[in-house]
Image (cartoon, helix red, strand yellow):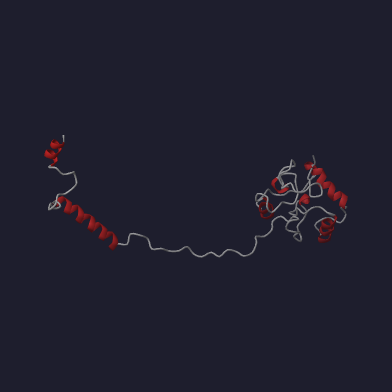
Amino acid sequence: MKDRWRRETGGKAPGRRRKGEHVSDMGRRIILAVAVAVMGMTAVDCEQPFRPLPYMAKSVEAPAILTCHDGVGHVAGNKPWILGGTCCCTPTPANYALHVQQGTIDKSMTYDQYLALYKARGIVTDLDHTGCGNLCPQGPHVVFGGHCMATPSPAGRGLYELITYGPHKPLVAAGPADAP
């Protein structure tokens, strides 16, 4: 077997040259073609010139608060959510007095009537329960169409930012048709 291989191949492995044997004409042409191609690529700039993106500075100011709540404080002039506004602050006597002073609640409405609006819609607030992270049986936060108006927790699944800065469903005032 070994002898047959030596006779057919001349005793050398394919692709290997013997000492003193030179590269064939075809090999020279291939080497020359590769060398010319490499030189051609380096001579011609094939890449697009680097152009950095324009610098866009980030704003150092927080976005405008869309919905105020106890976590961020009351935004002056925001009407209570139950009356079609964007204030989700807990309806405490102090907040009620603040709304009356700012003119966002009619002076003829009493505090008990104000609380009755929340009860009529089935909305629970921090006066009823706290710490649920808006994951209680009353559903998501009122701005998402639920019945929970507990103050969102800053560590709670990104809901704090969504409730505070939006986007969420349009808020509509409570009317007789909305009562359960």
* Residue depicted at 66% across the width and 54% down the height: 161
Q: Position of residue 27 (x, y in %)?
A: 17, 51
Image quarter hosting the N terminus: top left
Q: Looking at this view, is 132 or 52 the one in front?
A: 132
* Residue depicted at 79% across the width and 43% down the height: 121
Question: Which residue reaches farthest top?
Answer: 1
User: Does 10 sit left or right of 48 as displayed?
Assistant: left
User: Does 120 sit left or right of 60 as displayed?
Assistant: right
* Residue depicted at 72% across the width and 49% down the height: 171
The vertical placement of 139 against 29, above or below, is above
Q: Looking at this view, is 67 or 23 the one in front?
A: 23
User: Does 23 sit left or right of 69 as displayed?
Assistant: left
Where residue 3 sits, quadrant-wise, is: top left
Question: Which residue reaches farthest front?
Answer: 2
Q: Position of residue 45 (x, y in %)?
A: 32, 62
The vertical placement of 55 against 121, above or below, is below
Q: Looking at this view, is 72 or 118 the one in front?
A: 72
Q: Position of residue 138 (x, y in %)?
A: 75, 42
Where residue 75 sits, quadrant-wise, is: bottom right
The mark tally for this picture is: 0
Image quarter hosting the C terminus: top right
Q: Position of residue 53 (x, y in %)?
A: 47, 62
